[in-house]
Image (cartoon, grey):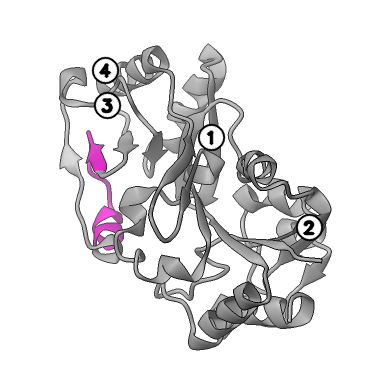
Amino acid sequence: MNYLLALDLDGTTVNRQGNLGEKTKAALLAARKKGHLVVFATGRRDIDMFSFWEESIYADFLLLNNGAKLMRADTKEVLFNHVIDPETAKHLIEKCLKENWQLHIVSGDYWAINKWNDGLQSYIDFLGTAPGRYASLEETPWHRVEGFMVTADLKPVCRYIEEQKLPLSYTPSEESCVDIMTQNISKWGGLQEMMKLLNVSPEQVIAAGDYNNDLPMIRGAGIGIAVANALPEVKAEADYVTENDCDHDAVAEIVEKYLI
């Protein structure tokens, strides 16, 4: 049986420097040669992929924005893209400007923030690109926002979304970052939409991750895997926990165990 291998990127497939290990590259090529499909299922958006586009070709597909956007890895053809309702985007942007809450706005190559925070420079250095700044709604593409991100003021922004019952989904992608998407978005939801396009069943899916936003796909896949450096709650939900961590080619271990 051929499988769809769904792999979280950061903390799972790439090492802590943001690169694929040589063993992982060889394993992914071998899996695809056997007829299996590989999708990098990540919270990253286009701007987060700038320094990784060349290595992204080791997958067949890229499922970005926690499941909201699917593209082919080789041609970058977009197969689906669920953006945020314009009035909802406008509402949240205006509220964050009024309260001076930080809000990153991301859409394709566009990335801008309204407020700086400590730690942002290291993120800029990692990406190799810097955000613009906005101080008014008119300076933003509020009518077509793919996603928001918050790396400061996490609690008030998330609390406001809940209190106002805004049609948004949000999930922590790491300890100090929350990703905000349109309603009912998750990596597993995106994978299910992708599976319909490819005529793939859940039993044919192997999903691997390390963090809370990976849990839905780990639970839903035929085989759910946590890497050695995953959070305890992620390991508890997995069918298999790797011996190796992301810095020691955990994905190569997965491929060798299940696919080749």
Q: Which residue is mark 3?
A: 100
Check disc 2: other Cα within 10 Å, few if <14, some if 14-19, many if 20+. some
Check disc 3: other Cα within 10 Å, few if <14, some if 14-19, many if 20+. few
Which label lies toward us, 3 or 2?
Answer: 2
- Which is nearer the N-term, disc 4 or disc 1? 4
Please provide the residue range marked out in magenta: 110-124
- The amino acid type, in three-letter code, at marker 2 is Gln
Q: Which residue is mark 2?
A: 204
Q: Is residue 251 above or below residue 99?
A: below
Choose between 47 and 92: the one closer to the eye: 47
Quadrant of image for the C terminus: bottom right
Secondary element under disc 2, as helix, strand or loop, is helix
- Which is nearer the N-term, disc 3 or disc 2? 3
Q: Residue 92: image x %, image y %?
A: 37, 20
Quadrant of image for the N terminus: bottom right
Which corner quadrant of the image does residue 231 belong to? bottom right
